[in-house]
Amino acid sequence: MLQILKNLEKEALREISQISALKKLENVRIKYLGRNGSLSKLSKQFPQLSNSQKKEIGQKINYLKSALGQVLEKKGKELEQAGSNLAQENLDQPSQAINRFGHLHLVSQAIEEIALIFSKIGFERVRHPEVDWEWFAFETLNMPKDHPARDEWETLFIDTPQDKKMGKMVLTPHTSNGQVREMLSKNSQPPIRMINIAKCYRRQQDITHTVMFHQFEGLLIDKNIHIGHLKGVFDYFAKNFYGPEVKSRIRPFNFKFTEPSFEVDFSCSICQGKGCRTCKSGWHEVGGAGMVHPNVLKAGGIDPEVYTGFAFGWGIERTYIMKSGIKIPDIRILYQNDIRFLEQF
Amino acid sequence: MNILIPYKWLLQYLDTKATPEQIAKYLSLCGPSVERISNIEEEPVFDIEVTSNRVDSMSVLGIARETAVILPQFGIPAIFKPYKQKIKIDVKKNIPLTIKNNPKLCKRIMAMVFEVRLGVSSPLIQKRLKQLNMRPLNNIVDITNYVMSEIGHPAHVFDYDKIKSHTLIIRESKKGETAISFDNKKYNLLGGDIVIDDGTGEIIDLPGIIGTKNSVVSPQTKRFIFFLETNNHKKIRQTSMMHGIRTVAATLNEKAVDPELAQIAFNRGVELFIENLKAKPISKLIDIYPQKPASKRLNISHQFLKTKVGVDLKKEEVLRIFKSLGFKPKLNHGLYTIEVPSWRNYDINIKEDLVEEVARIYGYHNIPSVLPDIKHSINTFDKRFYWEQKLKNALKHSSFTEIYSYSLIAKDLIEKANLKEKGHLKLKNSLSEEWEYLRIFLLPSLLDAYALNEAKKNHLALFEIANVYLKQAKLPKEELRLALITNHKLLNTREQLKLVFKEIGQKLEFKPIPSHPQLSQGFEILSKNKIIGFLGYPKANLVKNFCLKRKVVVAELGIDNLISSAKLAHHYQAISKYNHIIEDLTFTVPANKSVNKLIASIKETSELITRVEFKDKYKGRITITIYYLNRTKQLSNQDIAPIRKNIVNKLASLDIQLVGTV
């Protein structure tokens, strides 16, 4: 019996040392130490032994159980350790997997960002028609029939019959056609807070102009709206769109649909308004604005003695390109749809 | 309009120690915008943009007046020095000159005849004209240009002896009449233009616009008529634009120059002729001024001013500003009454104009910025743009790249796309053939964009979301479409589209169709049982016309309704306590059988079948995975067996055989 146990010990130790995988370890344990394992089977022969043999064999079996258990545990730890060391891949190489995102157009990104900034201060986003009557594009904006912007050198006219009241059909040259439309859609009931973002069309195509472009038009009408409010909104936009150090300023200008009218500048984010090669004067011109002309309010059914408002209309492309770092020298590239351009954004 | 103003010339009418840089800076903040200071003839010259409503500022005098109001606001003393006539005119002779006016055409006419020797202008006048980018011509004409730039009223000279009748009649032109300008251009008049007739029917001037050859001053001139007229500005614009004659005089006259200014300009001109040319006046002054414009009065309350400007203005400050502008203010119980000076007659009309005057002189930079209180309303807001953005992002994450193409297309593109020109709205005055028609499909533009990029990328997937313009009774219907083009596989694209629209809670169905105007093969896309678009392979002639080299898949669908009914409310279904039984069955399927119909048919076999999925295809055999579930008890193989048998029998009757045994 003792000899059997000695052989068993030798065999078990040999087999354990040859285990190469963790999952095999359990099988070996069961084989020797399990309920029907080798040691267990030998233990069943115990009753047949003499008393002096029982003592010696008993001690040996207990010793084996404990020793083999320990060796198995040690082996187990060894294999775990080795397992984590074995799984060493070469990480310094490219991945084979292809994760492909497409791209949203620069103009979509600009629109999303601008709309978000204005929505946070309560400007509701809308989209008014691109094809409109002269009535909304000019007449209700206090622009008489002989105003230069209305002539055929500037505005694109559709080849359709004229309407008696509404005039000719045009492609709107500015998102301002949305002003009176918005007032009427709200039943001429202020407060009116809109940001109209839509396509506009003008009869010019060169380095800084495309026939089709986008504008965003803000309109705020309420009681006691004054010039300080307009400045406040521009300062807010400047900081949130261009950067916290950027300031806005307004200077006198002239539009038929606003009085007073302004030209709006933002300070150069590179030189903070001091003047540099990029901006020259320290300021970038972003577009026009003004207090809504009383005739425009009247056209929208709103009493200018009770309500006032301001409006501004700027180019999406131009406003976005002014962000430092985006150096696009020719605006026409935006609509040429070369994938090598689109992929950069 | 841009004007050039030499600094030294300005100082003739402005008493100040301000530097050119200071003037440029402060003028731009409160008045016309000084865009640049150039060095011309070794002196600083301002390049100023004056808005078209301020013709009073389009001269040295006008800028001096503005600057005198603005500089003191910044603590820089400045005093305006108005023109004062220095010389006295003593006319002994009075040679004949008859002028007949039409008051509808000219508001004022001033004229006088001079005797002179033609020569060269003084160095000062030549220098100043060069600083204005004008070419010195001769000492007579130069003074008319000088006076126009200095005072702001255009002036003209005629050769007296060329007008044999010594008569000038102001009338409207008749259609078909012609005039030859002094620079030899012939103009066929359309009628209604302001012209000067010498009494014989011959046109001897287009006043306010350009002089004619038959009356122009030349080296032979011995006597000239110095002539100023204040024209009907609307007619000037009409004639000038119609014939494209954009002289400086025309650009001033179309903006309603002040007839009072005619007198100042005239006196100044006379002074210069006498001083510089030693010209001798030989006729009495003719001044036809039928109606001096009535002086305009406006009222504005102090409260109105404060409310509009957003500053607690002091009454003394407002009075001072009005006064400095020449508005002669009176204040009575909080109400200002101002008298609009003649030179501001055109642009000051309503009390909001006065708000502008006060606010800009006070200084826009002095008005504090404040965000307006935004009162929100308890209304549903338009979520349209939110869903559009979600859709775009879903497309982007499905590897599509967004393009923006022009809404206006060429006839060429319409034809390439096999569409009809007459279905499209057309422009009357397009800039070029390239942008002449408003598109009714996005697809042609996408085919173009694809062809442009095809060679540049192996994998190409483009989309656009934009309006198309559908003719209808009044304004066209602007319908929002999604169009895409890709070299992905057709069925993959279909699955991508389903996923993309799932993002906005919309379920799309795809019905295979045998024929379609744009497709050689493909699907109709349906939403809620209505056809909204198509997906498939473009027709062969489209592939040819757009020179596509590889196989592409195209789609276009209207998304207005999908966007407006988008939502994300999914229904929750409790997770089952019991497990699915999942098994694969393989069938031999004849090539012409619709696998989708097969799948639908299997699903219908029992309520306990929750899912049927296509797993694999190999040589005419299709493997389907079937999911069985009973929510009330755990299914076993015995429960499934009869269902399986049903499926196999059902399909066998359709000639689809199970591979293996039941």
Image: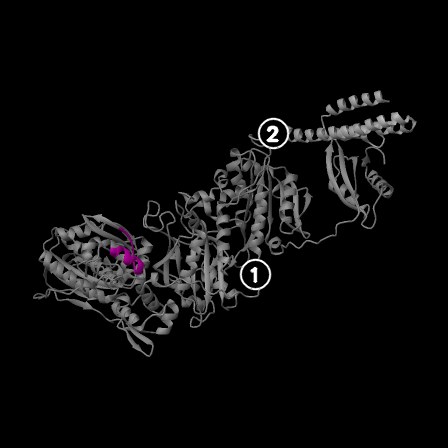
Marks 1 and 2 on same chain:
no
Of the numbered discs in the image, which one, if any, rests on residue B381?
A: 1
Where is residue B360? Give x, y as percent.
Answer: 32, 63
Q: Does residue A91 show up?
A: yes
Q: Quadrant of residue B49?
A: bottom left
Where is residue A330? Give x, y as percent.
Answer: 40, 43
- Left or right: B603 in relation to B203: right
Three-letter code for the amino acid on which mark 1 is drawn: Phe
Tell me the residue that label 2 is attached to. A89
Q: Nearer the viewer, residue B631 or B262?
A: B631
Residue B416 versus residue B660 in the image, above or below: below
Disc 1 to disc 2: CB gap under 8 Å: no
Q: Secondary structure at mark 2?
A: loop
Disc 1 from disc 2: Cα separation: 54 Å
- Left or right: B566 in relation to A212: right
Mark 1 vs mark 2, foreground winner is: 2
Q: Chain of mark 2?
A: A
Tell me the magenta residue range.
B22-36
**What color scheme is it?**
one colour
